[in-house]
Amino acid sequence: MTTALLVSIISTAIVYAVSVLYAAVGEIFSQRAGVMNLGLEGIMLMGAVSGYLVAVHRQNLALSMLAVIAVGAILGLVFAFVTVTLQADQTVAGMAMLTFGTGLSGFIGKEVSGVNANLKFESFDLPLLSKIPVIGQSFFHQDILVYAMYIILPLSMIYIYKTRPGMILRSLGENPATLDSVGYNVFALRYAYVVFGCIMTSVSGACVSLSYTNFWSDGMTSGKGWIAVALVVFASWNPLVAVFGALLFGAVSIIGVDIQMYFTAIPSQFFSALPYVATIIALIFTTGNFRKKRSAAPAALCIPYDREER
């Protein structure tokens, strides 16, 4: 394998991984707060189409990202209202969000389907770091969304495990009644983390339409939202472990595309399915009962909190 090919595979795998990691990290925060959202795929599609619509009509990436964040926040408020305030079943609410986001994104994206925005996040070198052989051009010749994830990941780890708000977050998913008894507003905190998770998921969608590719098509996230959900479990609700899982799935996806040219007799759908097969295998080995290990899932996950039942 030539150096150029190796660099191409690694750098593309990183971009793919980041397009899933934003959603996975956001969902880790949401689930640690006790709220599971299975509608990530629909939210990603809404983020992808809203960002691309603004890019086409305004030719401004900053405005595109503001639209992406706004859409994520609105969907997050809706989901929080349904699951936290109305205490609806989180699984059902998530599937409703998936259906809603998938359908609405396809409808409002019709006008830009196949339209070239001529605008995307371009890669650029980081001084000095990009000069490191192989690693430099793989990790430090990327776009701003990838570099932002390099910062978000360590900050997430510090926040969850090394700060007082992080301790409160972990308690929120384990025993919200205890937090309520000492004066914390469980409902407000859950709203905040659900909205944050949905904003991150919406940004994941923007990574697909404005970074990983440069177009919009109906259903273009192709199951990345489900991979993000799987990553949360695979990583045992730890953002750092999610990185390795995302890179694994990204590498499998990219290698699957590259080796198609050598196995032309095999249907392309087989190679397209490889990341999802890898996801299932990884989940079996990391969550299967045969491991005889206690699940790391927050104890209060998917359990609506009712102050009257404390």
Image (cartoon, helix red, strand yellow):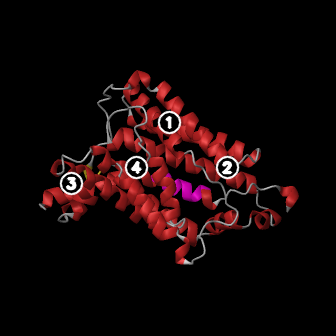
Residue 171 against residue 192 in the figure, above or below: below
Q: Which span is picked out in magenta?
A: 22-30
Query: Which residue lies at the image location 42% right of the left edge and 59% below the top edge?
Result: 279
Helix, strand or loop status at disc 1: helix
Q: How far across and down, in percent of the image, does residue 268 sit?
A: 27, 44
> In the image, 138: left or right of 52?
left
Between 53 and 265, which is closer to the camera in this rendering?
265
Q: Nearer the viewer, mark 2 or mark 4?
A: 2
What residue appears at the point 76 percent right and 61 percent down from the top-left corner? 184
What amino acid is found at the position of numbered circle 4 in the picture?
Ser
Q: Is residue 31 left or right of residue 50?
A: right
Residue sitting at the far front: 265
Q: Nearer the viewer, mark 3 or mark 2?
A: 2
Answer whether residue 66 is visible to the viewer in this image. Answer: no
Q: Which residue is mark 1?
A: 46
For the residues labelled 4 and 1, the Cα–Cα distance comes to 14 Å
Q: Position of residue 257 (x, y in %)?
A: 25, 49
Which residue position is annotated with label 4?
19
Residue drawn 65% across and 51% down? 192
Residue drawn at the location 11% of the way across and 60% of the way down: 2
Rendered image: mark on residue 8: 3
- Of the image marks 2 and 4, the number of the one nearer the N terminus: 4
Mark 2 — residue?
Answer: 90
Look at the numbered discs 3 and 4 and tell me whether their residues touch, using CB distance below 8 Å: no
Spatial separation of the CA atoms under disc 3 and disc 2: 40 Å
Sort mark 3 into few (<14), some (14-19) or many (20+) by Cα contacts within 10 Å.
Answer: some
**Element at label 4:** helix
**How far, Cα to Cα, is label 1 from label 3?**
29 Å
